[in-house]
Amino acid sequence: MTTYRDGTRISRAFHRENDHRALFVAYIMAGDPDLETSFEILKGVADEADIVELGMPFSDPMAEGPTIQLAAQRALKAGTKMKDVLGLVRRFRETDTVTPIVLMGYLNPVLSYGFEAFANDASDAGADGLIIVDCPPEEADALTDALEAAKMNLIRLATPTTDDRRLPTVVKRTSGFVYYVSVAGVTGVKEADADAVAKPVQRLREASGLPVAVGFGIKTPERAAEVARVADGVVVGSALVDEIAGALETGSNENVTERVLSKAAALAKAVRSARSRGA
Amino acid sequence: MNASLKPNDWNALPDADGRFGDYGGRYVAETLMPLVLDLDKAYAEAKADPEFQAELAGYLKHYVGRPNPLYFAERLTAHYGGAKIYFKREELNHTGAHKINNCMGQILLAMRMGKTRIIAETGAGQHGVATATVCARFNLPCVVYMGAVDVERQKPNVFRMNLLGAEVRPVTSGAATLKDAMNEAMRDWVTNVHDTYYLIGTAAGMHPYPAMVRDFQAVIGQETKAQILEIEGRLPDAVVACVGGGSNAIGMFHPFLADESVKIFGVEASGHGLNTDKHAASLTGGRPGVLHGNKTYLLQDDDGQILDAHSISAGLDYPGIGPEHAYLHDIGRAKYLTCTDDEALAAFQLCAELEGIIPALESAHAIAKLPEVVKEVGKDGVVVLTLSGRGDKDIFTVAEALGRKI
């Protein structure tokens, strides 16, 4: 059991007393399939999830599989801008002041916005953390400075290729939690192996003193429950976003939100019933 | 020019973090970071190993066909009525372009690292063909990602790659051109890190690729230097090359960076024109950002989304540029001109008619700017242009643009 507490929404979520279970972290893409629908999905998903990761669409998401890539394309086609992503967070905070929101995306839109301006605006809007897929720790100092000044967490990624040599670099200046990418690959393609993640999760916990959430390759409630037995958090993205794509394919825009929320509920239930966290 | 930078310092760039000034770096997913660091180390060792260099030199001589000629383009010189124009004939290399220089270097490195599978991305198909060629030669499986649009407009090269035993995977995302092929190659790499070597075709991407590709292509400028000294008894007044990602250009430029008397010109593709949204001139029409592992000039909108580039030449159709070019542009050591599709088409035909050489559409961009370059160096000047590839692959594109049927 990790003992890290810094009073942020993220650490409070991981440190709820008498509730030592793994957290369910839901990923959705801001602006997918359009801004209003994604706001409805965000509100609904936050009722099921302990933390929401809100994807910031990017034209060239090199680490995403087809599902998230297409979601980003839909969002951009619908006209989603960075200020709209922050606008979603701001509106969300009018009714929910508890559920942490972690923004997730690629460096160029944030660089283009300006690190300080982005950190300040995101923090003002009510975002709690940031994950940037293509910004390894070696390139992250300026961004980390800006986020720390705005009291936002920079959440780092660790992967199966993160060896002992790199571990200190990866955990340095990270906060909130560590995101363990359970497969070498892109989002939503390979399946995560719960047995194989147990060891690296423990290693990361010890090295960082932070909770460890596991993502990439977790699509079913069964798999989510398995991972929940060994991790502090379970991240599911592609499986939720797939529901949006599925609903759009059948041509019925009305049940988009419904389908995503029903999937989120099933995943949340599986994670919550799995077992207590970090025991 | 940056006063603190002494001529001999050019080889000190990039620094240990892979930076050329503010540009370059290693902006990759964490999964790839250990691999990229290993590659950096492996390349540094190979570079310093005389055996590796001797092996590479042997293949360049006997397989690639180096040194290739430095040719006095007499009729073009007369046509423009100014400085003497020489062509560095990279189109005479095996496979018909400069790309093989780099592929030969990288495949030897990949084998040295024990990698057993090669992936690559390609725009015009020249790099794909060169990669497929070295993979055939050294018996390694090869997958080439190519935008579906490029697969269509460069059919002969797709066929060549297949003949050489490579699998060509058409990429349909985005604009289905070079940048999308590069995204897809990076997805493959991140998925198959354990055994796969990503053979990048241009002097862009994450460190050490920009430096490594430059080093392998620097043979162009090194040979040119020796050849022009022999023919003219002096250095050229200017060197000029087309720039997409910029590998043939940096290969020519780099050995001349310390020679302050040599003016350096790169030519970017401005497609339908810089005032339209259909061009590929990232230095002239873009601004700095981060894509595909490096910080450099990029075509992007106000929100940092990458724009689709356009050029009639598939090899220049990329919204970014190698980081060393970004640096040379900022400090003013190289000057970057722009050339439209129409200007390139005219130069393509002019070169064929006057010199009996059908140049690649990429190289035609550089040829089109010769009047400007010639004017800059005066009547007694000497100009060397990298003829980076041959134009056989482009005849269908050109025929269509000219409204002719083949």
Image (cartoon, coloured by chain):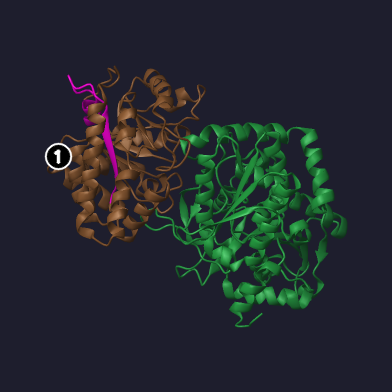
Letter of the chain in brown: A
Q: Horizontal and vertical percent for residue B257?
A: 68, 49
**Would residue A128 be counted in the magenta stretch?**
no
Between A147 and B400, the one nearer to me in the picture: B400
One can see residue B163 in this view: yes
Report x, y in % for residue B336. Answer: 59, 60
Q: Nearer the viewer, residue A18 or B313?
A: A18
Answer with the quarter of the image where residue A176 lies: top left
Q: Which residue is mark 1?
A: A96
Q: Residue at x 20, y 40 (%)?
A: A46
| Residue at horizontal 67 percent and vertical 39 percent from the top | B110
In this rendered view, identify the residue nearer to me: A27 or A112: A27
Q: Amino acid at mark 1?
A: Asp
Which chain is in green here?
B
Could you say whether the residue bearing mark 1 is in a helix, strand or loop? loop
Q: Is residue A27 located in the magenta-colored stretch of the structure? A: yes
User: Residue pushed farthest bottom?
Assistant: B404
Query: Looking at the rendering, in which quadrant would you find the N terminus of chain A?
Result: top left
Report x, y in % for residue A149. 30, 33
Q: Residues within 10 Å of mark 1 (few under 14, many from 20)?
A: some
Above or below: residue B341 compared with residue A130: below
In this rendering, position of residue A105 left or right of residue B299: left
Residue extent of the magenta highlight: A8-30
For the image, the number of numbered tags is 1
Indicate whether A199 appears above or below B356: above
Question: Which quadrant would residue B10 be assigned to in this image?
Answer: top right
x and y, in percent, of residue B29 in the image: 47, 39
Task: Residue at 57% x, 40% y: name it.
Answer: B207
Residue B204, placed above or below residue A228: below
> What residue occupies the far front of the structure in this picture?
A222
Q: Is residue B350 left or right of residue B63?
A: left
Q: Quadrant of the C terminus of chain A?
A: top left
